[in-house]
Amino acid sequence: MPDQPLLDVRDLRVSFRTRRGSVTVVDGLSFSVSPGEILGVVGESGSGKSVSMLAVLRLLTSPNVTVEGEVRFRGRDLLALPDKEMRAVRGREIAMVFQDPMTALTPVYTVGWQIAEQIRAHEKVSRKEAHARAVSLLSDVGIPDAASRANAYPHEFSGGMRQRAVIAMALSCGPALLIADEPTTALDVTVQAQILDLMRELNAEGSAVVLITHDMGVISQIADRVLVMYGGRAAEEGPRRAVFHGPRHPYTWGLLDSVPRVGGPRLRRLPTIAGMPVAPGSLPEGCAFAPRCRLRHERCEERPELSTGAGPHRDACWLPDDDRASLRLTSRAAATDVPDKEREATP
Amino acid sequence: MSALTTSTEVLLRATDVTKHYPLRADEFSPRRRVLRAVDGVSLEVRAGETLGIVGESGCGKSTLGRCLVRLTELTGGRVEFDGQDISTLSTRRLRPVRPGMQLVFQDPQASLNPRRRAGDIVAEPLLVHHYGDGAAVRRRVAELFDVVGLAAAHLDRYPHEFSGGQRQRIGIARALATNPKLIVADEPVSALDVSIQAQVLNLFADLQEEFALTYVFIAHDLGVVRHVSDRIAVMYLGEIVELAETEALYKEPAHPYTQALLSAVPDIDDGTLTDDVPRERIVLSGEVPNPVDKPTGCPFRTRCPYARERCAVERPRLTVTASGRHTACHYPLAG
Amino acid sequence: MLRFIVKRFASALLVMFAISVLVFLIFFATPGVDPAARIAGRNADPATLAQVRHSFGLDRPMPIRYLLMMRHLLIDRDLESFVNRGSRVIPQIVQATPVTLSLVIGAALIWMTAGIVMGTAAAALRGKAADPLIMLVGVVGVSLPAYWLGEVVNLITQKQLHSSVFSWVPPPGYVDLSHDPGQWALHLLFPWLTLALLYAGIYARLLRGEVVTALNEDYVRTARAKGLSERRILIRHALRCSLIPIVSLFGLDFGALVGGAALLTEVVFGLPGIGKLTFDALQNLDLPVIMGTVLYAAFFVVLANALVDILYARLDPRARHA
């Protein structure tokens, strides 16, 4: 019996009120994160992956946003917490780093000051002690000459160094969970490798990580479990090996097949997923992916739920469970043959 | 990747191209410094092939792309296109050359004028180069839209009404308008979602076959570049460090930087790569140096795990090895 | 840094030279100007006029006149007013300076405090009812012309309600600080408020915009993710970054005001500062005094510009290494 999950999200729903009515960006998402594990959340634009994590930390501050559902962290429902207690969770029990390191830090304060600020917001320590901890944190994440770098301003750091500093800051109070939203997308690939190594180290020291990305390769290298999102919903979820070696959802097939690889055979044409990623607010009644799925049938007009009980590897699809591998081959053959002069329908 | 056998006819030749940006000395940094964006690049692009140019930030690949189509003036060196030396031609003299070589940009949002309709954007090059009367232009634009997979209804829409992938198709249609021989594509799919990226890459392949195009494809994504290119040039701090046929480059990189780059790419492990040689894992320390403070000798020596004394003193030139590969390294990893 | 100062100093001299020439030329191109008539007094006979012209060098060619004036103004420092015979320009300016400084510094303190508080409050309460109300006050402040507002204030405090609510308000005028601090402040109270109302509006609007922008920046999102309180984020992060352009603008406004831009306020409230001096000189077409005050003002504007540039670098670390 696995231990109680660290984070247990149930039926999360996030909608925005716009001039055109209500737009649902996250539509009944459920997932969990166990202590010490790395969950990779993958999806394209409009999948709701970023918004759902922002909702977990209650960082969606616009008055037009409605968040419903349950977000249980260490047993407590974060969505029901009073503001003051939520602030104690943020930065201390759950930390978050974002995509663009160039704009993530306040430009007018030194990096050391900003790290110390976080420490002092959650712990009763003196300025001196907080600063000393900041220096040692910077050194831990591989920033050379940490003592003098702590007194430098953010713009004096390069992209990779800045991201390291941001990660150091996020981990300053020893959170149990780190949410990283596309942390390496804006970085060079060689720097990305360094940052991913760093995250592996930090994970080995105990923090669980939710890593949001669009890059299947990154997930493939670092995640323990994978959650594939589409249209604000979960499409597939499971242990990394299971999802990558035996993907079950047609969207996952499409994602894996359409990425040009660095190894393996070179294809003349890439298999593609027809059409465009669904825009929030245009979600169909049934399966979100059905309009683009080559294997859609009548059943798909009813929304499939993430299959329960079939072990840790689950998917939200009506296709027969035992036939997925061969269905995938059929679908891939069809995907490659179709000449790509598809008319993209603009909604 | 073209299905045609590429001829040995050279369509574009760059010889020792340099592009330097002098930085203004101001009250806070009085030293006059130079940004060597492109620092002595030589390459040939053969008719019908796709030459990929790959590198990380500060390597100068985008600047090189602009130099090759003379969107910017060269600080030094020569560029010959279709037998003609275009290195120092004035804007006026370049005009008749331009229809033959076109550029597709990275950011589909920024490269389309938001105040003009899609059809007008694609028509513009035709009008500038006096393609024909209004009816002929309209026909051609409709034809181009069809070729890139857009509908007639899209002609009258504005850029903001399109998705990213569609905007990129508009950019491609515009580049195709004047029937170019060469298209330089600068990170054309980087801003797109993965599933759309595949569609646009397929479009590039189809167009190359249909119109016998030659591509210079600039990208930072090693998977993308491998997919499209016949040959690949790897750039670092303004220089080409390796130039080789695609498969040779990926299977057996000769330059330490290429090796590190390939090693760093997180490739998808889906159980299908059993036949590949396992890559040696190299994680480089530090980051790409600021191009303004380019290291002496070999630009990569500050991060190279194999650097020796000669590397700090003498800048390695791009030399051809026995197997026909070009490497700029004193101690290449492969011959 | 030294190069910076030298370059700025050189350009300052150039600017002031250009201004002085311009003033000079404009003055003599103005119809109805005959300094000799001014000096000699009304109904002077032609002989006196000719003599006055000669002794003041007014019959010499323009460039010579200009050089003579500049010499008297800057080197000999004994340039005399055309209108008030015997009274020198420089001492007049020196005497007027503390008045203007008192007015401007006091008003600046008030308007900056009010502007920052109003702007920050409006940004923090954006979307709620208080936001447009605060901005309305700002708009009103910006729209009211200073001289009109001043006159209305005077009307109320000196006449209408003088006997009842505002009996404590002294008549228009100035009392030296060293003479009687209490009276000094009392005399300046309404001038301060009048001048401040105009600028507070401008700064509140500007600051509100900057703070709202800052609150949408990535670094504020990071600060929230750190678990900081909204108040701390607002003041320590958003406001601190928004102050940079505000302070720059303040430097320029302050420089202009010290140089005499609060002209109408001084006139309406009878404060004998630089502004009033300039005003009177213009009315009387008193060229030496005009020249003196204009150059004085130009100097402060140029100085303020240079100081603001330096200050900007101090406040924004990113500007230091550009």
Image: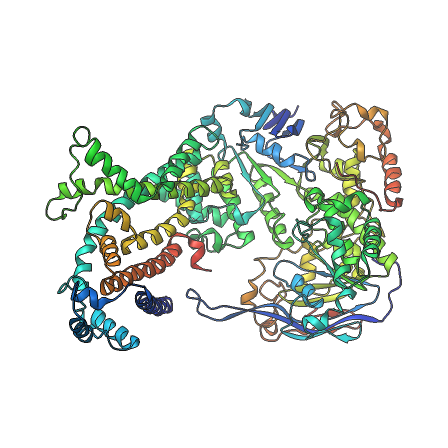
Q: Position of residue A260 (x, y in %)?
A: 77, 49
Q: In the image, residue B169 lies at what x, y percent?
A: 76, 50
- Give the answer, above or below, for where A263 lies relative to C183: below
Q: Is residue C75 visible?
A: yes
Residue A335 drawn above or below residue B221: above
Residue C229 visible somewhere in the drawing: no
- Residue sitting nearer the eye, C258 or C34: C34
Q: Nearer the viewer, residue A262 or A44?
A: A44
Residue A136 at x, y = what percent?
A: 45, 47
For the rendered model, the colour scheme is rainbow
* Lateral position of residue B275 relative to residue A163, left or right: right
Q: Nearer the viewer, residue B8 or C109?
A: C109
- Lateral position of residue A3 relative to residue B33, left or right: right
- Relative to the observer, which residue lies in front, A314 or A1? A314
Where, quadrant-wise, is the N terminus of chain A in this rendering?
top right
Quarter the C terminus of chain A occupies: top right
C315 vs B297, left or right, is left
The number of discs equals 0
Residue B3 horizontal/vertical position (percent): 88, 58
Toward the left, the furthest residue is: C179
Q: Within the image, what quadrant is residue B180 found in?
A: bottom right
